[in-house]
Image (cartoon, rainbow, N blue to C red):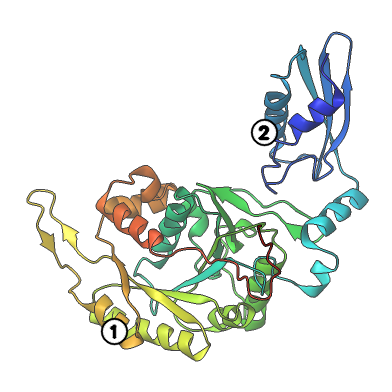
Amino acid sequence: MVTRDEVHAALGQVMDPEIHKPITELDMVKAISIDRAGVVTVEVLLTIAGCPLKDRITKDVTAAVSPLPGVQGVVVELGAMTDEQRQAMVTRLRGPGAAQQKKISFWGEESSTRVLAVASGKGGVGKSSVTVNLAAALAAQGHRVAVVDCDIYGFSVPRMLGVTGRPVGFNGMIMPLEAHGVKVISIGFFIDADKPVMWRGPMLHRAVQQFLTDVYWGDLDYVLADLPPGTGDVSISLAQMLPGSEMLLVTTPQEAAERVAILAGKFAQANQMRIAGVIENMSYFICPSCDERHQIFGQGGGETLARDLGTRVLGRVPIDTRLREGGDTGKPLVVSDPDAPASQELLKVAASLPPNRRSLVGKRLTLLT
C-alpha cells in the first residue's frame, strides 16, 4: 500500500499556479490520509477561500497522486488558510519586513533580472504591441517574463495579452495574472473599463510603486515596463525606483516620430539608464501580390535615432494587420503565427537581448580537486 511519505513526495511536484512553488513548500497540504481500500484523501489549504484556480489545483493534485502504486482513488478536500498561516507564507516568500520596506523583489545587487523600460516619444508608434509581442517571444524562448503596464492613463496590455479578471491579494501581497507564459499587472485589472483614470503625479508614483513592491513576482529573467509616451511622472518614478535599468526605444521610420523619440532617449541618458537599442516599428509593408517592399512611413528613422544615441537598431518590424488584430483578440502574433515576417523580426530582437548573469564578484567559489 502507498505511504503518506510517497504521497507527500508526489505532491512536491504540484505547483501553486499563481506562486509557482510546490504546495508542500508553501504549507498548503494540511493532511494526507489513506484508507484500507487505497483511496487517498488530501486536504489542501487555499491561500484564500474561493481561489479562482481551485479547480486546477484539484486536477493537478489528483494527477500527481493517482499514478502511485496501490492508489485506487484520490479525494481532494479544499480549505482556506488562516490569516496567521497566510502571513507566515508571505514572510517566507518575501522575507521579514518586506512589506514595510517596500522592497522590489526582483531588483538589487543579488538580482539577475533584466529590466527593459519600453518607451517612445509619442503615441501611435505601436509601443505596447511591441512590448506584448516581445514579452511573449521571450517567454516562448523559455524565459521567465513579466510585463508591468505603467501606462496608467492609456493602459492596453491586458487586452493585448487577453488577460481578464482581478488579481488575488492577501496580507499586503498581490498575485499577478498570467497569459502566454507572461506575468502581468495593470491598473486595468482594478478599475472599470469605461472610467478614465484622473490622477496627479503622486498617485501615479504610488501606483507604479505598488506594482513593483506589492506584487509577488517570483524569480524573473526579464521585466518589461510599458511606459506611457513622453518623459513625464511615470518615467521619472521608474528611473528612480529601478536605477540602472535599461530603456528600449520604439519608433517608426518617420522623421517626426524619430525626432520625438530621441527626447525619451536623452531622458534615459540623463537618468543613468542604459539604452538597450531601438526597434523600428511599421518599418515597411510587403505587398501580398508581388512581395515588393513599400516604405509607407518613409525610411531611416530608426537608424538616425540609434546613431544619435550611440546605440543600434535591434529590429525592423514590418506592417502586418494581424499584429493589430492580435492586440484586439488578446493573442500576440508571435504566438498565433510565429513564422510571420513581423513575428520573426520580434523573435530575433528577443534573441538579441540575452538575460543578465548573476555576478560572482565577492562570492566564495567551491574549488574542485
Crowd tier of the residue under label 1, counting other residues whose Cα lies within 10 Å: few below 14, some 14–19, many 20 or above: few
**Residue pictured at 45% horizontal, 53% vertical:** 136
Q: Is residue 7 in sight in this rendering?
A: yes
- Name the amino acid, label 1: Arg
Describe the element under mark 2 as helix, strand or loop: helix
Quadrant of residue 313 within the rendered picture: bottom left
Q: Earlier in the sequence, mark 1 or mark 2?
A: 2
Residue 261 in picture, x, y percent from top left: 36, 81
Q: Which mark is residue 307?
A: 1
**Residue pictured at 85% horizontal, 21% vertical:** 3
- Name the amino acid, label 2: Arg
Location of the N terminus by quadrant is: top right
Which residue position is annotated with label 2? 56
Q: Is residue 354 left or right of residue 196?
A: left
Describe the element under mark 1 as helix, strand or loop: helix
Quadrant of residue 194 within the rendered picture: bottom right
